[in-house]
Amino acid sequence: MKNLKLLILSLSICLLLGNLGVSGYSNVEPCQRSRCNNCHEKFLYRHVRPNTPLTTDRNAWEKYLREQNDCSRPTQSFLHPKDRERVDAVCSSSGGKRYQGNLCISQSPFTFLTVRSETGTCGVSSVRIIKSKYDVNSQQSPKSSGSPMDVYPLVC
């Protein structure tokens, strides 16, 4: 009897967590704010930082990455800090559109910087300005200019 109660309690907790969006980063309502915002916060931490350089100067970016101790990814992309509210709006029906599964994209393009660096050394090889090219009226996949970050899908 004790094991049955424990089993029922465990199943109830799993079902509750699944409905809250904890299990597998799922959200019952894509493109709406989830109660579990770890993925969105991680996205903001990686891509919308308050003190990023506003330049394509490689030396400025190398210095920034070293100061942030963030040399672990060879390609990183950054949105302008002033776009924070627009990024948050992607997780709303007015600012976002369902892309795939739990991923949502903006209904308007973003401009961002892509920084390529040597893993571990922070030696920056290039900094490019890229404008996303997603056409929200199209039912096709996003258009790409060859960059893996032409579209910023978000888990809301």
Image (cartoon, grey):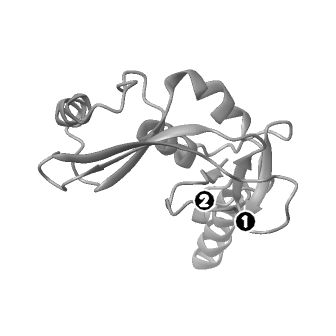
Residue 6 is situated, as x and y percent measured from the top left of the image, at 59, 70
The amino acid at mark 1 is Gln
Q: Mark 1 points at which residue?
A: 100
Residue at position x 80%, y 50% in the image? 97
Secondary element at image label 2 = helix
Residue 100 is situated, as x and y percent measured from the top left of the image, at 72, 65
* Mark 2 or mark 1, earlier in chain: 2
Image quadrant of residue 5?
Answer: bottom right
Q: Looking at the image, is 23 positioned above or below residue 52? A: below
Residue 127 is situated, as x and y percent measured from the top left of the image, at 34, 42
Residue at position x 42%, y 42% in the image? 46
Front residue (pair 150, 83)? 150
Left or right of residue 141, residue 78 in this image: left
Residue 43 is situated, as x and y percent measured from the top left of the image, at 50, 44
Front residue (pair 128, 62)? 128
Image quadrant of residue 19?
Answer: bottom right
Image quadrant of residue 103?
Answer: bottom right
The amino acid at mark 2 is Tyr
Real-space CA distance between mark 2 and mark 1, rounded to the nearest whole angstrom:
13 Å
Q: Which residue lies furthest to the left in this view?
A: 121
Which mark lies nearer to you, 2 or 1? 1
Left or right of residue 79, residue 70 in this image: left
Dot 2 surroundings within 10 Å: few (below 14), some, or many (20 or more)? some
Residue at position x 79%, y 37% in the image? 95
Secondary element at image label 1 = strand
Residue at position x 11%, y 49% in the image? 121
Q: Are marks 2 and 1 in contact (CB under 8 Å)?
A: no
Q: Which mark is residue 25?
A: 2
